[in-house]
Amino acid sequence: MNIIDIRNIFKIYEIGDVKVHALNDVSLRIDKNEYVAIMGPSGSGKSTLMNLLGCLDTPTSGVYNFTGENVGEMDDNDLAEIRNREIGFIFQTFNLLARSDALHNVELPLIYAGVSASERKERARKALIDVGLEDRVYHKPNELSGGQRQRVAVARALVTRPSIILADEPTGNLDSKTGREIMALFNEIHGQGNTVIVVTHEEDIARHAMRVVRLLDGKIEIDEPVTNRIVPEPVA
Amino acid sequence: MDIGETFRMAFSSLRANKLRAILTILGVAVGIFSITLIMTIITALQSSIESGVSALSKNTFQIQKYPAINMGGPGSRAKYRNRPDITLEDYERLDELLTSAKYIGAEEWQFGEQVQYEGDETNPDVSVAGITAEAQNTNDWIVEEGRPINEGDVDRANPVCVLGADVKDNLFPPHINPIGLTVKVSGRPLQVIGYYEKQGDMFGQSRDNFVAIPIGQYHRMFGVHRRSVNITVQSFGDEDYDEVIDEARGHMRTIRKVEPWDEDDFEIFSNESMLEEMNEITGGVEIGAMVVGFIALLAAGVGIMNIMLVSVTERTREIGVRKAIGAKKRNILTQFLSEAVALCLLGGAIGIALGVGLGNFAGSLLNAQAAAPFGWIVGGLLICVAVGVFFGAYPAYKAANLDPIEALRYE
Ligand SMILES: Nc1ncnc2c1ncn2[C@@H]1O[C@H](COP(=O)(O)OP(=O)(O)OP(=O)(O)O)[C@@H](O)[C@H]1O
Ligand SMILES: [Mg+2]
């Protein structure tokens, strides 16, 4: 079954008299445990598409079936629940809570999932260890490097054990070494049977995936499998 | 998420903005403070009155020309002044007629007098009571040493006196027994025949700084028609108390020839009636305090709303993040509501602590017992919650309904 199935999606912004077709008749199906890279030049609609896939945004028109259910018919609470339970979202700009330490940031989705405080702390700590931040648990975002922040964001996305990971330029702010580490992490998550969708404009990063979807001006231009796939070394 | 968790989060977010939180809290604190302060003073006074240090002794009531507490507006004083004085003859008639009473005494008071013994003198703040013998019973003045003023002293207007405990202590060193000595009261030599037991203070005033003399002697010293006589009556017990009051009222009307259609030209008051009047006054003050407190809370509430709106705007991105990772509307709603309530509760707690503290301090100056108006403390905290919910509702609603994507994009 397609975990993601979008058909004829349009996302149109109207600024004054000008209409921007951020997404222009996009249809896309993604199966469980696929590893997809979304590419395209700046402004081509990658983030817009990711926000739609992540149930954060709603399309101007078109249908989105998430695990067989029509997202357009869900109310705010249902959407919040899907975001919380099914989706791990890693933002282009981290979006960590500036005043909270790493542990609390990672705990946050578990709070809204209704997990008890003690279990929450344990799982959050474990998620931070998994991304190699065991000695940065009580650091606030402004006390962390860019790569460390990115990893906190990854830990937060993974802590709820979502079945689908959406990462918008997860390596955009990182040096190539840290970038490779993050990609190795994704590879591992994918290896555990989860679905991973990564937005990137770097060919090297895209080659970690098994399928590449190329956007141009809000349209899918190319949708093809990756032939020369890079399989990173597992994280130590 | 349980309540404890919610409030921990609320307080930690208030800590992040200490100064602003404190300023906002101040408004609430002032409102709640003004209410609790006044309520504490009132409660302290009331509990003091009620717990036995009553103005009158048990089963006793007083008949006077003037009411105990004058609450009428301007001009009401004139109404009482125009009543005929209660005379010693009125008292004597009542003493004959009112056979059901245990004791009936008459007394007149002169304030601000001086007592001298040889070279020593008291401050000119001693009260002189001209009394009949039974007034000592109705007042519960118990002679510690010597003898009380008796019927014979009163009949012959003997130049004798019984000292209140303070006067005795102020004028004589402990090793001197004043009985049999002659003191000068307001310049007149009187022989000390005894002194009374200490009665203690009420409302910060000593009740022992007086000298009792036979009423006839008092009239010689201060004139007969200077002031109306107070009559104090004691019944045998609780059961016949109201009856005795009614009878006394009837006899007084007869004695003073009050026409059936006229109202009494005298006041009868008991501890109960004084308490009632006291409560009427405090009731007025209570309402005043509530109005002041209410206005202050209203202003504080507007302040809370303003701060919460600012906070929502400032934290738009935070709200976006929370929603993006699964916060539901009601999570955001409770988060901001509980912050508003936490602000109000903090303010309320400070206000209550200050109010009860200062109220009791003021009460202690009046020698009232320490008290805490529990009803008002609980009520005050509930009011705080209500203010927080009411004024926090709109900002919280606004936050809860932010669109996650718009909120995340907010700069
Ligand atoms: N809120 C908005 N209002 C108006 N136009 C918008 C809005 N969000 C996106 N757009 C427009 O939609 C188009 C696609 O934006 P999007 O953010 O999806 O691009 P992107 O592919 O993620 O680019 P980048 O690689 O720079 O992140 C852009 O032309 C942008 O101007
Ligand atoms: Mg983008």
Image (tube, coloured by chain):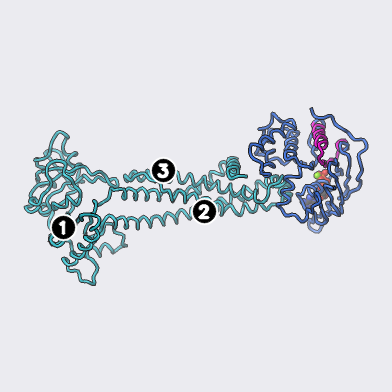
Chain colours: A blue, B cyan
Type of amino acid under label 3: Gly
Q: Which residue is mark 2?
A: B299
Question: Of callouts 1 and 2, which one flags the residue occurring earlier in the amino acid sequence?
Answer: 1
* Chain to which the residue tagged by mark 3 belongs: B
| Residue A186 falls within the magenta-colored stretch | yes
Type of amino acid under label 2: Ala
Marks 1 and 3: same chain?
yes
Type of amino acid under label 1: Arg
| Residue A196 falls within the magenta-colored stretch | yes
Q: Which residue is mark 3?
A: B357
Crowd around label 1: few <14 · some 14–19 · many ≥20 (10 Å): few
* Magenta segment: A178-205
Crowd around label 2: few <14 · some 14–19 · many ≥20 (10 Å): some
Q: Residue furthest top?
A: A236
Q: Give the CA separation, mark 1 to mark 2.
A: 55 Å
Q: Is residue A138 above or below residue A220?
A: above
Q: Is residue A173 above or below residue B58?
A: above
